[in-house]
Amino acid sequence: MLQLKGLKKSYRGKTALRGLDLTVNDNEIFALLGPTGAGKSSTLLASAGLIDLDAGRVDLAGRDVTESDPGSRDIAIVFEGFNLLPVLDVKDNIAFALRSPAFSESEGEISLRVGRTAELLRISHLLDRDVDTLSGGERQRVAIARALVRRPVMFLLDEPLSALDLKLREGLRAELRQIHRQHRSTMLYATHDYHGAIAIADRIGIIDGGVIQQAGTIEDIYRLPANVVVGRLVGSPSMAFFEAGIEDGHVIVKGARQRIPIGEFGTVASGSGKVLLGVWPEDIEVGSADAAGASTGTIYAVDNRGFERAIQVDTSGGSFRKVVPLSMRFTQGDACSFRIPEGRGFLFDAAGGRRISQAEGAR
Ligand code: ADP
Ligand code: MG
């Protein structure tokens, strides 16, 4: 188990971590999902002991390792940039850590482990090649093999697949899950890719501004998103937000026809005033312009995605994106209707972005 408590880190006045707490359980794949600059790499580097923290504590397998050097932590880290040694061939790159004084394995044992790990990552045929003759995907496999061969307690992956094309990325992601199943290793996987995160992880942590905004299974997060930041980073497309107000026991979306009784949202921390109404796009009903009881919007953009299309709808309360079947023949500039079904929205504080409604989304 990896436990991070109150991690703080600034680089020459630039704050990267502002009191970050995170627990990664044994044998789970935990994805750290957040945009560039959120603090993902700093979190991984701090876990591995590769940066000095300003404050906070790192526990690994129940032991306080905050002051321990990286070599003694039994953590392997894979960066996006491959970090292979160009002067060595594939075999020696993978064996590198095992030959360090910290391991001192026999050459027989090393060769056995390198062989097995190479098989697992399907790079056995590359063992005698020089790394600079490999493709990007092959290099990334070697980099992963190099970390994996040590059988560390904890495996940190910093955007390991970002540089690869889609097909390779999906293939390697599936292999990482497979390796994880076989080795029961614990993985902390940093990515800015929502699909990648939910495809690989048992739990995810949404990170932004140097803190974990919410951690849990993707179902937990969909059921009760903690704040606006989480809504903007989760989903594909992400959460729709509408400017709204609470008046006379109803939520009224700016410029829209619908009045939603406040009771639909469960206990609400505030009885009046401005709020943001957040709805997962899958829950929004969109139809032709004349639908009864619905509010109106305009189709701002249409993206064809092969078997479906994504539309962007502009409304007076805000715009949202949603995937619709090809049978809905919207074109740019069309008027349309939209409706938020009962019990499907969340209310957020308009200023701070915190969720102020307690009812769970119906999922
Ligand atoms: P992420 O991996 O999510 O993109 P990082 O942990 O790399 O986030 O960065 C968090 C913040 O810290 C960013 O604003 C980044 O610019 C800053 N930062 C990271 N490393 C350095 C560094 N070595 N020197 C100065 N600023 C840094
Ligand atoms: Mg990074």
Image (cartoon, grey):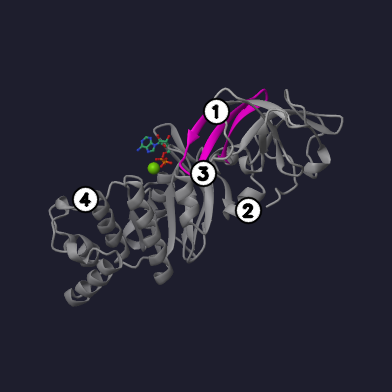
Residue 58 in view of the camera? no
Mark linked to residue 220: 2
Q: What separation in Å lies between label 4 and label 1 (alpha carbons)? A: 42 Å
Amino acid carrying label 3: it is: Ile
Whether pointer 3 and pointer 1 mark residues with C-beta atoms closer than 8 Å, the reply is no
- Residue 242 as seen in the image, left or right of residue 169: right
Q: What separation in Å lies between label 4 and label 2 (alpha carbons)? A: 39 Å
Amino acid carrying label 4: it is: Ser
Q: What separation in Å lies between label 3 and label 1 (alpha carbons)? A: 36 Å
Mark linked to residue 3: none
- Residue 358 as seen in the image, left or right of residue 4: right
Whether pointer 4 and pointer 2 mark residues with C-beta atoms closer than 8 Å, the reply is no
- The residue labelled by disc 1 is 331
- 216, above or below 153, in the image: above
Q: Secondary structure at mark 3?
A: strand
Where residue 129 appears, as percent x and y from the top left, is: 13, 59
- The residue labelled by disc 4 is 135
Whether pointer 4 and pointer 1 mark residues with C-beta atoms closer than 8 Å, the reply is no
**Callout 2: 10 Å neighbours few (<14), some, many (20+)?**
some
**Callout 4: 10 Å neighbours few (<14), some, many (20+)?**
few
Q: What separation in Å lies between label 1 and label 2 (alpha carbons)? A: 35 Å
Amino acid carrying label 2: it is: Asp
Sequence-earlier tag: 4 or 2: 4
Chain part drawn in magenta: 300-324
Query: Residue at coordinates 57% horizontally, 34% vertically from top-left?
Result: 329
Residue 141 in view of the camera? yes
Quadrant in the rendering for residue 330? top right
Mark linked to residue 207: 3
Query: Residue at coordinates 72% horizontally, 24% vertically from top-left?
Result: 254
- Between 335 and 317, the one lying in front of the other is 335
Q: Secondary structure at mark 1?
A: loop
Amino acid carrying label 1: it is: Thr
